[in-house]
Amino acid sequence: DAGSPTKVAGAPKPVITKAVKGEQCVEDTDIMRRDHMKFLNHHRDETVVEGIRTKKYSLKECINCHASEKTGSVAAAKDDFCVSCHSYAAVKIDCFECHSTKPQGSVAQHALNAETAHYRHKLAAQANSKVSAEEMAGIVQ
Amino acid sequence: MAAAEFDVPELKDDIEVPKIREGSMAHAKSFLAPKPVQDFMGYPHELSEDWKERAIDKMGDLLGKYRSLKVFLDACVHCGACTDKCHYYLGTSDPKNMPVARQDLMRQVYRRYFTTPGKLFPKLVGAKDLTKETLDDWYSYYHQCSECRRCSVFCPYGIDTAEITMAGREILNHVGMGQKYSNEILGKVQKIGNNLGLPGPALEDTLEGLEEDIEADTGVPVKLPIDVQGAEVLLVTPSADFFSEPHVESLIGYAKVFHAAGISWTLSSHASEAGNFGLFNGNYETMRKVAMRIRDAALELGVKRIVVGECGHAWRVAYSFWNTLTGIGYGGNDPFSIELQKQLDPNYPQPQHICELTNDLIKQGKIAVDPSANDDLVVTYHDSCNVARASRMGDEPGGQFAIPRELIQSVANNFHNMAEETIYESTFCCGGGGGLLTDDLMEVRVKGAMPRMTALNNVVKEHQVNFMATICAICKAQFTKVLPKYGFDMSMVGGVHQLVSKAIKLD
Amino acid sequence: MASITFREVEGSSLKYWLLLGGLGLFVLFGALSWNYMHHHGHVVSGMDNQIVWGLPHVFAVFLIVAASGALNVASIASVFNKPLYKPLAPLSAILALALMLGGLLVLVLDLGRSDRLIVAMTNFNFKSMFTWNVFLYSGFFALVGVYLWTMLDRNVKTYSKTAGTAAFIWRLLLTTGTGSLFGFLVARELYGSAMLAPMFIIMSFAYGLAIYLMVLVAAYAWSGRTLGDAVMMRLKSLLAVFVAAVLYFVVVHHLTNLYFTKYHAVEAFILRDGGIFTTLFWVGQIVIGGVVPLVILLSGLGRQRAWILVACALVILGGVAQMYVTIIGAQAYPLDMFPGLDETSSFFDGEIHAYAPSVPEFFLGLGGVAIALLVTTFAVKVLRLLPASLDDATVAKLEH
Amino acid sequence: MSELKPMSDNTPESAERRRVIGGLAAAAAGLAIAPGIKLIEVAQARPEEQGASSAVRWGMLVDATKCATGCDDCVSACSTENGWTPVAESAKPRQAPQWIRKLELQDPLTQMETNLPMMCQHCAEPPCVDVCPTGASFKRADGIVLVNRHTCIGCRYCMMACPYKARSLVHEPLNDTQKADVPRGVGCVESCSLCVQKVDRGDGTTACAEACSAAGHNAIVFGDLNDPDSEISKRLRELPTKQVRADLKLNTGVRYHGI
Amino acid sequence: MSTVTIIYAGMFYIATLLLVAGLVYKIFDYSRTPAPLKIPTTPAPTTQKGVIYRMAKEVVLFESLFKSNKWIWVFGWLFHFGLLLVLLRHLRYFTQPVWFWVDILQPFGKYASIMMVIGLGGLLARRFLVDRVRYISTPSDYLMLVLLLAIGLSGMMMTFVTHTDIIALKGFFLGLMYLDIQPLPQDPALLVHLALVALLMVIFPISKLLHAPGLFFSPTRNQADNPRERRHVAAWAARLDQGN
Ligand code: HEM
Ligand code: HEM
Ligand code: SF4
Ligand code: SF4
Ligand code: SF4
Ligand code: SF4
Ligand code: SF4
Ligand code: SF4
């Protein structure tokens, strides 16, 4: 089941928590595993320098989907999505020195996952302010 | 014995690294040892049917006995760092005189017969069958190496081509290709007691003559005792010191030092030779046999100290190997070495170099010297390779450089070193060491002396140096022959004790 | 032709290892300081949003300026073909490299994101003086490196003069660049001057030579080699000229500023009202770094080696003071956005900013100095940089 | 525009809570007027895949005559929107970043006092951009001067170069207290971003301008300087305005009236 | 499990076996072979401690090479130091949790590969350009450099151009170590890299790469210069004393 450690008796592997929403990543999992940093970096430059604000490769969106249900973050605990892989691969990233590791603010929807708005409840349940049904409907349309 | 015509290299300002000229020294071969010589040594004198098997067997035998050989044959990465370090390459441009190429002559064969890739893909790893041509190359080029170890200083793994050369010569001996010069000498030293084949009585005559000369010269009755039971010091010196010029001047120097210091000493007719050509052939047993004569003499005469005269490879064998071979030294706890240690005086290093001895005496004020006696000379010092890179003097590493220089500077006022990269552990061989001091190899000797001559030439030009001191009998003999070829006076070379002899005050 | 033998220092004595160890210790302190500042952020430093460049920059800029000056001796040898300086040239080149390395390390380690060095090396803004400096610095390493090579390897000796000249021109550009780093800061009143670049060049001559002299004397004294008076006297006269020139430039700089009314306030700050900065200016920069050394060098005292060294040390101290005044003084004086009006805000507008360097900053700076000396100490052991002897007789031969 | 705040956020009380409450208040205020604004905004908002355009030049007009003594609503609004700690709550005020600050000016002779907010002036010829070695300081096509914190190495050269002291270095780690929309981090330099996240979202205003209007002072007007029909352009045509340190000829995007 | 995975798994088991067995044998062989005479190249340290210091300088700084030839030294040292860093960085594929110091070194390894490749390039160029070195070079000398270069370049390809799935790769190797075979990502660059590495492992114990252990056994470097103070006799030579 999603989120449970894939640790078997044999070779150790990282815990990769299933994304909270959606069935599929913005690209094939295979590609994401190899090249997510390329997408992120490319998108980063476009956003910051040119002001292009598409959602597909936005870091905020990654976090929205991949934040752990337990910690609400992608990098707060050692089994959280980004961290578990990165400590396994010993690749340091400094993204979260600046970027919040938690979904926050306007949870924009993802083009591929329009129908998965139910996920909002999970986060909304933890949020300070309740999200009204109308509001949600407004966002999802 | 007319030596082949050849051009003496021209001396430039710097020692230049030449472009390679393949095969330029393939013709230089020393004479093969004839039957009687080989017989005495217990080697065949010609190739037998099964020479190849014999060679490979011997090689396997040596590989099992010498870690140096095994590691060196494996470890070389062909980095090329040593390629411009050998004086024979610098002087002859023959690429097979580059240390690594010299090793490769054997390494090719080693790879072919002893390593998996060489057995499977000989071309790939440069492995070659052992053929008569290879053997001839061995004979040529293992007798164009003076075993000076200069290459070993610069190799990142310390690969010492001398070790390969020695092994190569040993294998050559075993298939019947001994070198006449070395093997003859080895015969003489074992039969007669010294390399020159000077029998006991002749030696005594010579020494008496020298005593007379000294007295005539100085008015002091300095003695040159031989075979004196119970003397304190046994002096073992190269036999060339007894009558070759300029060697003999140093012998007079030693005598004066002992006299002035009041140390009783003796030579030995049984061990009237410090040199040990067994080293050159890489045969442990022969080297041991030759060295054992010293032990025997020491025991027989009951001396307390053993001092070695001015000879490079003799000092290497004495300093580095005597303890191993004969127990002259300390730290052994087997009956064999204890026997000797009981007799020797533990207050002195055993064996001791004559320079250590003289320098100590001067420093302690036990003998007096007047350096101005050498004011006509501007001196430089040639570090002999075996002293520089294979042994030590004094207590500190590098004492072999410091002590002779200290000694020279206490007996002579004008001293200048040659260029840094040509002295100390980087010293260039005189060109005649390692069993090459034969007229058959004159071309090799002259060309190989080029780097040293260049360095000398520079100090001559700059500081008007007119005397090159050294502490090796081979260097002295070689330079007296070679200096004139480069336009220098042959009397420019001499021993350190030649200077001492001039400066020492006798009473 | 007389030739000089260069020889590595023995470098096996206890003294040598103690020296190396001592310097190593300071390098270690520097590293720890960096680690501390990097881990906690600049919050643990004395720097803030008003004084943004602190003590590390003082050290770094001083070292960089001195680096280009240290090359001076070599330049005189090969560019101006003065044989006396030839044997002194290799040390000069290595010292230049070492000081530059020390300075750059301090500069780089003081970055807010020193972990992003790779960014600095792959992203360039060619309008920035800083970027140009990055190239000037790497070029300096390359050129001086090549120059040093031509001095050490006789196969390429013939190119020595070309390399030397290239290095010389480059280092003039480099110091101009370092000076312009400040000169281009239109916002800061103390910097708005074209004098800054030439002034930095002449300062570099003085600092570099002072350091060179101290290192030379130390190296010869500690390795037991002879260093004749001929060399010392020649170099000390040169130093006197440079120190005097620096003084001259400083005077002219402030006088021109005083000519323009708009600079009166800031000049008054430095020259009269600036507290620590005024003290550093008059006592540190002018008296200790200029007047006293000049007196020493030009009077009879200048014939004694110990006094020459004292003068060198003072020049160096004065130089650091000068950098402090130039770099930190200029920031301490508030930006004047609304001329004629008093400004107050939560952001300390209109106030004179105080700066108290923290211990890690100090040790980071010293770490740079230690690296420079460590590299030099090690280099003279492994490379043939120092003539075996520089006694008067040897030197005299060179002159002919 | 709803603020989703996970409960597990366990940052220490006061500073954080106050900001949250402030944020909620602002959000509530925003909601109140949202329907009205939204129509206009949506019309103006540029598509997300389209980058900033040089046809636009964002800027602000500050009317110092309207800026109230004792008010610092714009400053707290900025701090709330962008997540930087208000200086009053900072343990190290000298090292605390301030994107905007309230300047009080007084003529020593006449005792006449002027109030104004000071922030990055979004210069058209920004010295900070000129000096930045890595190009991290840059001017976006629409005139907003930003720090690309991915390439900023924290050299602080831009701080030395800016004549307005508009920039701050983040001196300490922020430990995941940043707002998701406004990443900020230790060792990098930052300054007023003209609320780029809001601008790109199509809000058509900035937090400070919003707050000033909300307080009824209307001292700040945000808008497109290139659009002759924008409110800001109209006002600029009518009111005499100045650039601070006009002598430097930086062509600032923030203009002041009443100084 | 794909065929490729099975082939590579088998390949690495065999290569490791050959590497370990070969090296162990060689080292055993070297240590067993006596060094009958004291032959340190002097001046040499007179104590065992001094020998360790001398060796350390040789291993870390390539001191003799430095004295000998600055060019070879520069390239050789760049290559070896780069190689060392790269290999240390590679430890992350074989350790879980990754050792903390590997974690610290990891980012440097990435750029060390540039050092390594530049070094190799220089060494290769020298084999073509310097007549003396050309003369002594055998085909295997070139191939060895080419092999390392190819390993380096294919590695850099993955680091800088076409990424591979590091997670799966690590899974594969941990799998080999835990005897629990995991699938290997099938990127061409990785397959080439790994095949060449396996080749390198196989030839290591039978080639000149033995210089690495060889250095430690080199009598001219690892002996103390104390023959007058210590009697040094090899076993086979001691037998001669008895016959006396
Ligand atoms: C203790 C470890 C090692 C030491 C001290 C060492 C030292 C050296 C030295 C001094 C050289 C000669 C100079 C040069 O050409 O660079 C050399 C060459 C070489 N080393 Fe190493 N090495 C070590 C380990 C290795 C390893 C693990 C490898 C390979 C995986 C390696 C590969 C090579 C190669 C290929 C060369 C020959 C370069 C050429 O062909 O020019 N070394 N090594
Ligand atoms: C079984 C052993 C090995 C494995 C599994 C392996 C795997 C890899 C992988 C996956 C990469 C890409 C790293 C990335 O994408 O960031 C890489 C890079 C590299 N590899 Fe290997 N490799 C092995 C052995 C070696 C060896 C023995 C060498 C050197 C002789 C080597 C040299 C390199 C180099 C130079 C790079 C590029 C720099 C780097 O990323 O570290 N590899 N290797
Ligand atoms: S030992 Fe001496 S003579 Fe022999 S190869 Fe080496 S350098 Fe040449
Ligand atoms: S220096 Fe040593 S390793 Fe290099 S080629 Fe010569 S013998 Fe071989
Ligand atoms: S909110 Fe408006 S009135 Fe208040 S300080 Fe800011 S600009 Fe002035
Ligand atoms: S006000 Fe300062 S930070 Fe803003 S653009 Fe101008 S120079 Fe840059
Ligand atoms: S601190 Fe950052 S933005 Fe400012 S100049 Fe340096 S790199 Fe550029
Ligand atoms: S525009 Fe935004 S970032 Fe700039 S001062 Fe106003 S609120 Fe702060």
Image (cartoon, coloured by chain):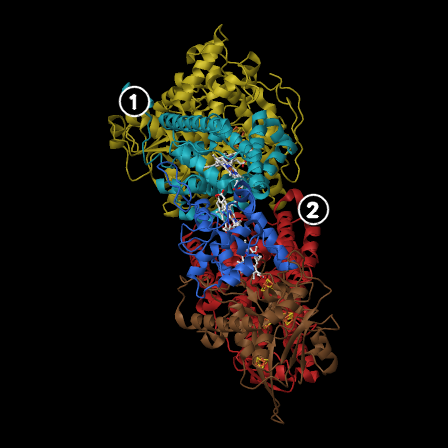
Chain colours: A blue, B yellow, C red, D brown, E cyan
Check disc 2: other Cα within 10 Å, few if <14, some if 14-19, many if 20+: few
Q: What residue is rendered at 67% in x and 33% in y? A: B10
Quarter that holds the N terminus of chain B: top right
State the image quarter where residue C199 is shown: bottom right
Q: Amino acid at mark 1?
A: Asp
Task: Answer with left or right where residue B290 lies relative to residue C202.
Answer: left
Image location (x, y in percent) of residue B79: 55, 33
Vertical side of C134 occupied by D59: above or below = below
Foreground mark, 2 or 1, reads 2
Q: Pick whichever, C114 or C397, lies toward us.
A: C114
Q: Pick whichever, B332 or E115, lies toward us.
A: E115
Question: In the orientation shown, which residue stands out farthest toward the bottom?
Answer: D110
Vertical side of D148 occupied by B431: above or below = above
Ligand 5 sits in quadrant: bottom right
Residue C158 disc label: 2
Question: Does the residue tagged 1 have its C-beta within 8 Å of any atom of ligand 3?
Answer: no
Check disc 1: other Cα within 10 Å, few if <14, some if 14-19, many if 20+: some
Q: What residue is rendered at 58% in x and 48% in y? A: A38
Q: What residue is rendered at 55% in x and 23% in y? A: B125
How far apart, in angstroms, are the residues tagged by discs 2 and 1? 61 Å
Residue E241 disc label: 1
- Mark 1 belongs to which subunit? E
User: Tag 2's secondary structure?
Assistant: helix
Quarter that holds the C terminus of chain B: top left
Image location (x, y in percent) of residue B445: 58, 26
- Mark 2 belongs to which subunit? C
Residue E222 seen anywhere in this rendered image of the structure: yes
